[in-house]
Image (cartoon, grey):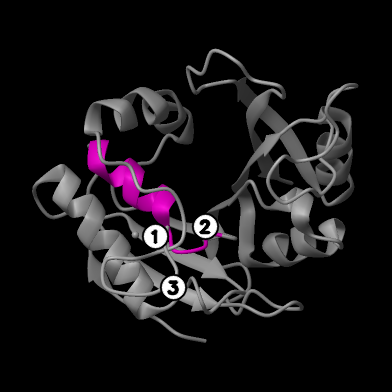
Amino acid sequence: MLLLLAPVCFGQTGAGKFCGYKYKDSSLLRKHFEKQLAFLNIQNGDTIVDVGTSSGAYIGAINVIAEFKNVHFILVDIDSNCLNSTRVNNMIAHYEGLRTKPFNNTIGFVLNTIDSLWLPMKSKKKLWIFNTLHEIPDKAGMIKQMSAVLQTGGEIIIAELLATEKNKIHGGCKDPLMSDEEIKKLMDAAGFDFKNMITNPIPVKKMKNPYCLYRFIKR
């Protein structure tokens, strides 16, 4: 387990490189993220765990347009090539540069393993897993791990492209996509109640698959 604390990073090697998207236009970033940010409902002082985060580019992007303060983000991923101090610091530097001032929040990271998130049990209130669940062979096992970290009444937010009759495979990783029914059935079996969701929050003209964010509450 590794931990980095810093004020609140594409690439493989070299200075300024990190894994994930690298926005260079803050107005385009705002257009893509403002509806998602509203749904996430981040409050001052929150601690949020982002599972499958890569180098944390999603966290960096939302911090460019964020109004919240004193939020601590914990980045969790199994890939040490993307989640390491160099990549995360590059990510922070890029997105603070886009914001033109330091973030008001902090970022830490944890390298997890297949069988553990390496986080204290029942210690967190908010966990995210974005564009990652469909890639995991043991989906029920991952949700069980996340549930163990979450307090009763806490929330998991899942973001996924949904399978359709014509498009059932993810265009990038080539893994099978999940359906709305599959996600809700998985979460209900793990002890979570569906609360709400948004569909296609990113204003892209052509979407082969609906992109959805779900909020589930632990019973």
Query: Could one spot residue 134 in this view of the protein?
Result: yes
Residue type pointed to by label 2:
Asp
Q: Position of residue 168 (x, y in %)?
A: 86, 33
Q: Residue at x 31, y 61 (%)?
A: 91
Q: Residue at x 26, y 41 (%)?
A: 24
User: Which residue was labeled with disc 3?
Assistant: 109
Labels 2 and 3 touching (C-beta < 8 A): no
Residue type pointed to by label 1:
Phe
User: Which residue was labeled with disc 1?
Assistant: 73
Q: Quadrant of residue 108?
A: bottom left
Across the whole image, how many numbered discs are drawn on residues? Answer: 3
Query: Could one spot residue 106 in this view of the protein?
Result: no
User: Which residue was labeled with disc 2?
Assistant: 50
Q: Position of residue 104 (x, y in %)?
A: 18, 53
The residue tagged with tag 3: helix, strand or loop? strand
Q: Residue furthest bottom?
A: 1
